[in-house]
Structures are given as C-alpha cells and as structure tokens.
Image (spheres, grey):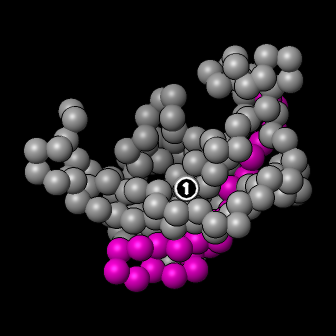
Amino acid sequence: MMDIREILDTLPHRYPFILVDRVLELTPGERILAQKNVTRNEEFFNGHFPHYAVMPGVLIIEALAQAAGILSFKTIESKADEESIYFFVGIDNARFKRPVCPGDVLMLEVHIERHARGIWKYKAKALVDGQIAAEADLMCALREIPQGQKTS
C-alpha cells in the first residue's frame, strides 16, 4: 500500500496533474491496483461539461498511465528524477464503457504484459463500482532527458 506522499516521491507529476491518490495493491513485475477519488472540485469539471460533469476519457487513460509508471518504477526499484522522464508512448484498443462522474472512486488496474529495451507494455482497465469505465493497452518508455533540454 502507498499513500499520496510515497506516490509523489515516485512520480514526477504534481497538482493539478497527479491522478493517483492511493495504491492498494502492488506486485512488482506484475500488477498494481490504485485508486483515484473523483471529486467535483477537479478543475476539468468546470468545462467538461458544466451541465453534466464527466471526467475526460483522456484523463482516465492518463491516470492508468500514471499507475503503470508507479508499477514500473517499483519493479526496477527506482523513482522519477531530474535526469530522466517516463513517457507515455502508445495506446491501443482504448474503449470507454461508462462515464466517470464526481463522487466516483476510479479503480486503476494495470498488468505488465512485457518489458524489453526500455519499452513497457501493459493491459489496463479503470473500474467504477466493479464496472469497466475504460480499458486500453498502453506503452511507456523511460528515457534520459538530453543535455540542455530541461525546462526547469
């Protein structure tokens, strides 16, 4: 189990873009089960949509990618640093099955399918109340930041 402090120590993401609140289960090299509490005060709900608040699908996928990042970092016993970046490099077979709304608890389940030459492939699904809200095959890569290209 990981709380938000350990998540922030593992991932480079910060408010308002950190989309994982807690890790409930983690088996390095295999799978992660994480949680995102969807609240009405999320900035994106102001425009998506004012009359019927729905979490954007792209942010559901990003939450899954962040959970995948935690799983990968814990698998290689590392964490984000200022010399490298964990890129989201591909998505296949994305499907959205139900809307995610304020008050929902989004469960993020990610399994490692393969890891070779710095590319990680995952099977991912986001669930609300046991129902699939979204699912996708994801690919991510850990890469060094080229000298002179850091923005901070």
Relative image position of residue 70 (x, y in whole percent): 48, 58
Q: Is residue 38 left or right of residue 87?
A: right
Q: Nearer the viewer, residue 115 or 4?
A: 115
At 58% from the left and 80% from the top, the residue drawn is: 113
Label 1 crowd bin: few (<14), some (14–19), many (20+), radius 10 Å:
many
Q: Nearer the viewer, residue 121 or 77?
A: 121
Does 37 appear in magenta? Answer: no
Look at the numbered disc 1 and give the secondary structure of its residue.
Answer: helix
Residue 149 position within the rendered picture, expressed as x and y whole percent measured from the top left: 17, 44
Q: Quadrant of residue 152?
A: top left
Q: Kindly indicate the quadrant of the structure image that contains residue 76.
A: bottom left
In this orientation, does residue 31 appear? no
Residue at label 1? 65
Residue 119 percent coordinates (x, y)? 41, 73
Q: Which residues are magenta?
A: 102-125
In the figure, 142 relative to 51: above or below?
Answer: below
Say which residue appears at 68% left-offset and 56% top-offset.
108
Residue 104 at what x, y percent from top left? 81, 38
Quarter holding the N terminus is bottom right
Give the overall secondary structure of the magenta segment: strand
Please state which amino acid type lies under the numbered disc 1: Ala
Q: Residue at x 74, y 46 (%)?
A: 106
Q: Is residue 111 magenta?
A: yes
